[in-house]
Image: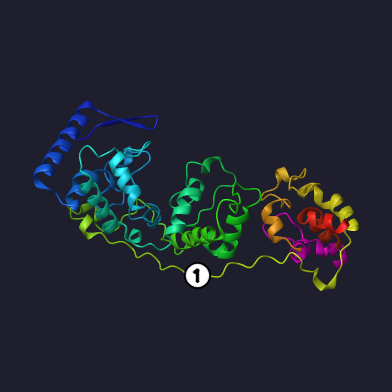
């Protein structure tokens, strides 16, 4: 039996255990060199001790590893890992994990063979190029906060408030449309750690990563594939046979490509033919709205500290991309459920709502247009 001691999150194996492991590895290597093992046998002898017979990371060694071994059956992981990445990891190991380099024990051909075995046996999603660009963008830009499984569990999540979106959550799937997600990636989200990526990603890349998230993590309640789940008698299958009996839930087909959302018409007129008076609206805003939204419209008024979710920051790019006169009028008139934004239409006339709408729009949303018109 392998003995180990865990201190401060690190695992220390006893000398006797290391000797046993070393002898086992030596025997396996020797057998490989003389027996020319198949990729399946290499996986069983070298990889299954950590990644499990089914490639799902469910092994006896799992509890002593931080971070845990990769679950190759997870569609999110399957989309994220390229063949080249896996070959490099098997060859050179991965710092900060228990994954050691195997280049001194396995030939390049053997490494490529076992990687291909893992991909075809446990990672059916990896055999398709669907959403490939979206997968790459997600891995490079999004996974640091949203996690490699799209569930918001990342090393950075503990320091983010509010926390990153969990795309595997049913409520999130019901709330987020494709168009809203594209806008969020493009312009960011006010009062969150979600920044706008339009200066670093093309429109095509933004659409690709949104479609990847929606098909990879949001398509169904089990699409994210939670590591650690068990079913039937999987834990009782003989070693070496469980991997050959692996059954992976089918990956959902991609949603039909949708046209990009049309930009908001920022020149749209006030509803009901109204004309707002910005001067009158300014007086009302400073007396009633600035305590939350701030005198400069930045969402940091004196009451903002006590409010969650935070008041709208009118200076944020997302606000300036979405809030035209009709949108502001509607928000002021009807309020917004789930926030402290009241329905001012119950105590104001439509003209007064139009006045404050005109002030917010010309002062915060489109100040440059106002300045140009004044010249």
233, 375: nearer the viewer: 375
Whether the magenta-drawn stretch holds residue 280 is answered as: no
Quarter of the rendering containing residue 89: top left
Quarter of the rendering containing residue 172: bottom right
Q: Quadrant of the C terminus?
A: bottom right
Q: Return the residue at label 1.
A: 257
Please determine whether, in this image, residue 256 is positioned above or below residue 133: below
Residue 165 percent across, percent down from the top left: 54, 53
143, 284: nearer the viewer: 143
Q: Quadrant of the N terminus?
A: top left
Tell me what residue is drawn at x 20 percent, y 47 percent: 110
Q: Main secondary structure of the magenta part?
A: helix
Residue 10 located left or right of residue 271: left
Whether the magenta-drawn stretch holds residue 353 is answered as: yes
Which region of the structure is painted magenta? Answer: 325-354
Residue 274 located left or right of residue 330: right
Tell me what residue is drawn at x 19 percent, y 47 percent: 42
User: Can see residue 184?
Assistant: yes
Residue 20 percent across, percent down from the top left: 17, 33
Secondary structure at badge 1 equals loop
Residue 352 located left or right of residue 138: right
Residue 187 percent across, percent down from the top left: 63, 54
| Outermost residue toward the left in this view | 34
How many tags in the picture? 1
């Amino acid at each position: 039996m392998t003995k180990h001691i865990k201190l401060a999150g690190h695992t220390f194996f006893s000398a006797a255990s290391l000797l046993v492991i070393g002898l086992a590895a030596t025997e396996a290597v020797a057998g490989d060199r003389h027996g020319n093992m198949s990729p399946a046998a290499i996986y069983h002898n070298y990889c299954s001790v950590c990644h499990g017979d089914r490639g799902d990371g469910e092994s006896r060694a799992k509890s002593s590893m931080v971070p845990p071994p990769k679950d190759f059956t997870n569609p999110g992981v399957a989309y994220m890992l390229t063949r080249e990445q896996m070959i490099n990891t098997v060859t050179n190991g991965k710092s900060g994990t228990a994954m050691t380099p195997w280049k001194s024990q396995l030939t390049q051909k053997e490494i490529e063979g076992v990687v291909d075995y893992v991909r075809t046996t446990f990672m059916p999603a990896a055999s398709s190029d669907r959403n490939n660009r979206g997968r790459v963008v997600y891995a490079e830009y999004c996974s640091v906060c949203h996690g490699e499984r799209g569930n918001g569990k990342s090393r950075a999540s503990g320091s983010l408030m509010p926390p990153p979106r969990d795309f595997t959550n049913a409520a999130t799937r019901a709330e987020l449309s494709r168009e809203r997600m594209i806008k969020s990636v493009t312009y960011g989200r006010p009062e969150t750690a979600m920044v706008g990526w339009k200066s670093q990603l093309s429109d095509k890349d933004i659409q690709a990563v949104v479609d990847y998230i929606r098909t990879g993590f949001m398509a169904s309640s089990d699409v994210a594939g939670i590591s650690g789940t068990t079913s039937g008698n999987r834990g009782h299958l003989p070693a070496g046979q469980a991997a050959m009996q692996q059954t992976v839930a089918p990956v959902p087909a991609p949603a039909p490509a949708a046209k990009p959302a049309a930009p908001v018409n920022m020149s749209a007129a006030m509803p009901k033919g109204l004309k707002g008076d910005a001067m009158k609206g300014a007086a009302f805003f400073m007396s009633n709205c600035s305590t939350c939204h701030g005198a400069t419209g930045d969402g940091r008024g004196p009451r903002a500290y006590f409010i969650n979710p935070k008041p709208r920051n009118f200076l944020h790019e997302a606000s300036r991309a979405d809030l035209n006169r009709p949108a502001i009028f509607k928000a002021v008139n009807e309020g917004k459920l789930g926030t402290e934004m009241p329905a001012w239409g119950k105590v104001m006339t439509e003209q007064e709502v139009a006045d404050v709408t005109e002030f917010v729009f010309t002062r915060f949303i489109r100040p440059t247009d106002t300045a140009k018109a004044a010249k």
